[in-house]
Amino acid sequence: MAAIPFARAPVNFETAAPYLKEALDNGWLTTGPLTERFTAALSDYLATPNLVALSSCTAALQIALAAASLPAGSEVIVPANTFIATFETVELAGLKPVLADIDRDTWNISLESITSRISENTSAVIAVPFAGNPINMDELQALCRRHKLTLILDCAHALETRYRGQPLHHYADYSCYSFYATKNLTTAEGGALICPAEKLELVRALSLHGMSRAAWKRYAGGPWRYDIIATGYKANLTDIHAAIGLAQLGSLTTNHARRLELVERYRQQLGGLPVRMQHMPANTSVADHAHHLFCISLSANAKRTRDDLMNALAAKQIGFSVHFIPIYEFTHTREEYDFPQANFPHTAEYFAGALSLPLYPTLTNAQQDEVIATLLRAFADT
Ligand SMILES: Cc1ncc(COP(=O)(O)O)c(C=O)c1O
């Protein structure tokens, strides 16, 4: 493991132990009372009664696409700069993914690019607030409404993101959250889906084989009989995972504040380097960003390559990553689709220099100083 890892979950045994003890000692382990409490707390935090806790964001995307009843084979527009889950879930749903470019400055899906990709077969857009950066939700929502498109948000990075004071799901039909190990709030593996009120029962059922009544409710004294109301998934969150999440809910606000502090230090101290940093859209403030990732993109005319920077970080055992390898770069997408790189100039430019640096609440100033000094030295060395 790197001396300064790229990511570190904001939870430890001491804080999680009381919740885990409860989850283990009640003898149930899977979806039950702790998942119910985690769901209630998240619903509170995100100000919605229409949230279902799930086993992953990938599952949330699958269930959103199923619940939305999009016409078979219709087109769903997704950004080229995202994790493969955003794309593959469209394929798995029997729909056709269409890739859009990102905005050169915000690194979020470009509204102009979406507009250029809309056809008479388009049924939905999946937008990703990249790194936690708010999208201009007024414009995105208006665009989707104008073209009668279902708007799904892949909020894997965007738990704390706000737009005009509201969590982003406020502006979308379906919003999918991730509690994967590296996320701002983690359950090791986990996720959540926020859906329209009238779809809540369907989404609950889809998360568990299409069952009308979850097992816990039946074993907890309800009637034994259940019905199957749709072809479902096995995507329920377990109480063991919920326990890990419950242990972090009290620190969400302070953890977010610490992320913001670290981002401001990175921005100030790396500001003189030939790198581009993410812009926020108009109508938003730096606190509206979830600061899930801190990504830079090395300028094409820099005297160092990205490999130089990666080698310098690796020599100091400092973890780093790249978000993301564009969807059009993979063997699968090259073989199965026609996505010429020329159609994604901003994604290609960003990716050519993309580098994500360590960012998590327990990263100390001294550790961050070492990351910064390593990068500054890499540029200073001849
Ligand atoms: C943008 C994005 N979407 C979806 C996912 C998938 O999340 P999960 O691992 O919870 O399925 C990730 C995971 O890293 C992601 O970054």
Image (cartoon, rainbow, N blue to C red):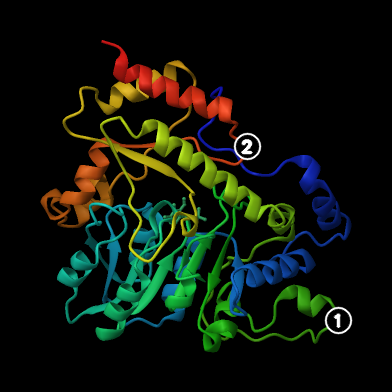
Q: Position of residue 165 (x, y in %)?
A: 50, 70
Q: Quick one: quadrant of the C terminus?
A: top left
Residue 90 on image: x %, y %: 35, 66
Q: Which mark is residue 362?
A: 2
Res 4 visible: no
Label 1 crowd bin: few (<14), some (14–19), many (20+), radius 10 Å: few
Residue 140 lies in quadrant: bottom left
- Which mark is on residue 262? none
Can you say whether 68 is above or below 254 in the image?
below
Horizontal arrangement in the rendering, residue 238 relative to residue 224 (left or right): left
Q: Is residue 121 above or below residue 132?
A: below
Residues under labels 1 and 2: Cα distance? 43 Å
Does the residue tagged 1 have its C-beta within 8 Å of any atom of ligand 1? no
Q: Which residue is mark 1?
A: 221
- Residue extending farthest top: 382
Q: Secondary structure at mark 1?
A: loop
